[in-house]
Amino acid sequence: MVDLASERLGGTVIVANDEFFASKENLLKVSKPIFADGKYTSRGKWMDGWETRRRRAPGHDWCIVRLGLPGVIHRVTVDTSFFLGNYPERCSLEACHLGTPPYRDERRRLKTTSTRWHGLLPERALKGDSQNSFPVTNSLRFTHVRLKIYPDGGVARLRIHGEVVPDLERIGRAEVDLAGVVNGGMAIASSDQFFSEPLNLLMPGRGKNMGDGWETRRRRGPGHDWVIVKLGVPGTITAIEVDTSHFKGNFPESCSVEACCAAGRTTESFPQPAAWKQALPRTKLLANRRHIFRQQLQDVGVTTHVRLNIFPDGGVSRLRILGRPGERNARPSNIARLNALLDAEAKRALLDCCASSPWAQRVLAERPFSTAEELLQTADSAWANLDCEDWLAAFRHHPPIGGKKASTKRSGAARRWSANEQSVALRGKRETMKALAAANRAYKAKFGYVFLICAAGKTSEEILRALQRRLSNDAEAELRIATEEQRKITHLRLEKLLES
């Protein structure tokens, strides 16, 4: 996972209530903490971390961090290295979302009561001179975190590990690095990372030295090394850059790149090996050189994952998968906006698509979504796993086909979508509309709920024929058909939600 708060990625400690002994900026240093024996400042012992004075009144100390890259937080590490008699007894963590950077009136907004802070980590005991690591369960996108320490003391480093959730609207349709960590790329599996980790491949900028890349041990047997990267932004590949800068006596002899389109986040959910397509055939590499491949690429369509193969082993400084987000000629969706909404706002948006509260809650629990397809698959699974009462509750929010008014509880978006879906059907002849109204009443009398059909593009005559045919079904068969029609309607509305 990515350290969302790393100063290397733009993370900043904005404010702390106290930093008497050691500066708050030390918290986000990329380097590991060090101890300097016998080193003192005018205020006391020099410590490589953030340290507050001894508290003589009730309360606790705190600091607020702006994440370098907004995202979903999965794990927090509070590192108290070299703090022994002066570490905090406990800590807690909160987070908030301030929208899209740059954050206007940032300091004022962080202090106002209107900013909602989500509790990610309740008070937890800390150990001195230790890596105190805690899992976090929350699917929301955050931009800032607030660390509280009880009652006072010193923390060497703060690591906020998670997944970057990029703003797809800002990315647009121009050529970008689909695999870059700033756009949500993740190195999720590799054959070996003995000398340095594969996440370095996706970092911004050029590698600083040989340690700022991915390097495997010397291979003494058959085979080759590889790394699998989940693209932060699925798209069509236009160029691939393999940079061996700083690797001179240990660069790979050659490389190849494969690609696939898969919704899963882990290797267990990938397609079988045969489903991987060759994007770049095996190609010779040179030492200490940026290699940019365009003409050599093969068309693999929309891609979500790539696998870089290096032969037989060695080091690579950077991997860039350049391309255009989304499918060719497709409009970018607002999936990032849905990921970023607060729970209540996101739930209201989902209820416009399907008026089932349990369904919306299950979909929300799976955020963030990388693609629209992942959202639709989640929506289908959540709908299929509801019980009969939940399905019927959703049906009740639909107006009858051809009815004059929808439920007053429905939002403007839901009413507008319903009217658009029925726009063709509402232009039927008077006789057809009367027959449709009568058939609607007969249907509800028999089954107890309104007749459901995905009406988009259908004429009133087509709908009437389908209604009359379905009136002969038994209750069990009709419920299956109605739930499938609701699923289709939900799909259409989710797509409209992402385009709005």
Image (cartoon, rainbow, N blue to C red):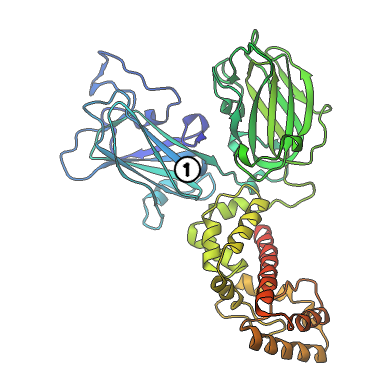
Query: Residue at image x 70%, y 24%?
Result: 309
Query: Residue at image x 59%, y 32%?
Result: 187
Percent across and percent down for residue 310 are: 69, 20
Of all residues, the one furthest to the left in this rendering is 56
- The mark tally for this picture is 1
Query: Looking at the image, which is closer to me, 71 or 445?
Result: 445
Looking at the rendering, in which quadrant would you find the C terminus? bottom right
User: Left or right: 364 with respect to 91?
Assistant: right
- Name the residue carrying label 1: 73
Query: Looking at the image, which is closer to me, 392 or 326?
Result: 392
Q: Residues within 10 Å of mark 1 (few under 14, many from 20)?
A: many
Query: Looking at the image, which is closer to me, 452 or 180?
Result: 452
- Amino acid found under the numbered disc labelled 1: Ile
Quadrant housing residue 447: bottom right
Percent across and percent down for residue 228 are: 64, 31
Residue 204 in view, yes or no: no
Query: Residue at image x 73%, y 38%?
Result: 260
Quadrant housing residue 185: top right
Q: Looking at the image, is 174 positioned above or below residue 48?
A: below
User: Left or right: 297 with respect to 151?
Assistant: right
Q: Looking at the image, is 339 positioned above or below residue 92?
A: below
User: Left or right: 349 with respect to 253?
Assistant: left
Percent across and percent down for residue 183 are: 61, 39
User: Left or right: 429 with respect to 32?
Assistant: right
Q: Looking at the image, is 3 positioned above or below residue 437?
A: above
Percent across and percent down for residue 14 are: 40, 39
Secondary structure under the numbered disc 1 in the rendered image: strand
Residue 22 in view, yes or no: yes
